[in-house]
Amino acid sequence: MHNLCAVVDKLPAPKPIANVMDVDMEVYKQMVQPPVRESGHEGIAYVTLPLSASALSTTESAQEKAAISLVIAKEAALGHVFADTLRFPLANTVFQTGSPTTMIYSIWERGRESNSLTLKTKQHVTHHGIEIDQGISALSVPLVPLSIPRQVIAGMGNILRQVVGPDNKPVPASQELEGIVPRYFKARGEPSQATSVWALVMNEETLSGVKKKLDLLLEVSPKTGDDASAAGNVQWETLWRRNPPSWSALVPEALASGARLHRVLSGGGGWGKKAGLLSLDPVAVTEDPISSDDFDSSDGLSDISSALQQVVNEGEYIQFFISPSISTPADIYDENDAILSNKLDNSLNLWGWEFGTIPSTLDSLPIRTRQEDAVKSNSISVFRHSFGALAEGGIVINRKLKRNAEDSFRTIRSSTVDVPFSRFSVLNVNKPKKKKEVRGFKRIYVKEV
């Protein structure tokens, strides 16, 4: 028996499927209804899988953060094999165990004359790969657009210098964003404050789909000659002040079409050559440091500078987004209590695999929380037929390509999703099976605190 134990930040409560007969609608609902009021739960989640679903572990790597790599889909087309993977970061356990992360891979052997297990090997690892059940997946990213896509004129590395402005003339990259953010807070009746902004980078092929989604959000009609680029302040401010916010499938569908999401690190202001520049979170192009029959191991990066690619190429388009404030921490805990009170124990139709992001507890919550003030409960909620984890760091989604049987998988598309309350889910509609067909089970135990 092979066993993998890892420490993650929190666990999700599974979401039931309302109508198993209309899968497309359930996927769409999952994309536009992000779990923005669920901060996660404490507990234990476990799943049993055949050994063939496991890739070999790797030990310390100076260039990569410890993570579990999940192979979430495989498909063949024109003799090529595509595989989508999700790299999920582990929790920081340096103050609990003395190690930055904790993941242990062990092998146990059952005795011939007894049912007891004997430990054969045990090692601390930083990466492990798992192939999960193939199925229909959905990604939700709770972002609201701040601008229309603008074509990039000049940039280098992760620094953006110029874009095409509203009058089709070159303008500093940060010029429009500097004016939009104060307007956004004013429209919502909130004081101006430090906030995080994300940039969606796309090519011309993805642009048309993004424009259609944006027209729907702004309630403009291209058939009458109006479009998002011509929408006035009223449409934008109406969109920004909506409560709850108008989530859409714009960002997830753009990512599926090849777009990339980057957090805006800094920019605006300045003078001279630095005036108007924007700095985006760079992307390091690497292979998942796992190996198996399907995924070849990587030797790592000898020089991190060689892995940094051009974040935005000239001629591509960039659009800015923001994550609206949803509620206070107390409201979130009230919602968590409601989630735990739902009786999902006997539900077979759930989003069976769920992985997502949550805000950093150090950055977003006050020193004293309801969890500390309330009397701790010993009650346990059990969620069967589901497995997942939540992270305070970003999830990396890769698409890999294998051109032929002799070739190895190589990353052709990569994007980091670090927006709080994002969720990647895989549909799990269970049907009655004979006992001999059941290969394993998955379950989450969540303790109410």
Image: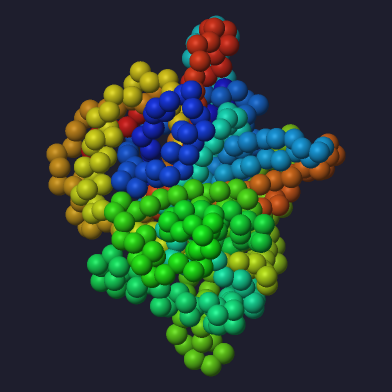
Question: Residue 355 at x, y = what percent?
Answer: 47, 41
Q: Residue at x 70, y 46 (%)?
A: 400
Res. 195 in view: no
Q: Residue at x 48, y 23 (%)?
A: 21
Question: Residue 36 at x, y = what percent?
Answer: 34, 47
Q: Residue at x 61, y 71 (%)?
A: 151
Q: Is residue 220 above or below residue 348?
A: below
Left or right: residue 216 versus residue 79 is: left
Left or right: residue 357 versus residue 342 is: right
How many numbered discs?
0
Res. 239 in view: yes
- Tell me which colouring the rendered structure shows: rainbow
Residue 131 quadrant: top right
Question: Residue 324 at x, y = what percent?
Answer: 35, 59
Q: Is residue 215 above or below residue 113?
A: below
Residue 35 quadrant: top left
Left or right: residue 229 versus residue 80 is: left
Q: Residue at x 75, y 35 (%)?
A: 76
In the foreground, 396 or 230: 230
Left or right: residue 210 versus residue 357 is: right
Q: Is residue 183 above or below residue 328?
A: below
Which corner quadrant holds the C terminus?
top left
Residue 130 quadrant: top right
In the foreground, 68 or 190: 190
Q: Is residue 198 above or below residue 415?
A: below
Residue at the bottom extreme, as displayed: 272
Residue at the front extreme, as displayed: 224
Which corner quadrant holds the N terminus?
top right
Question: Residue 147 at x, y = what percent?
Answer: 47, 67
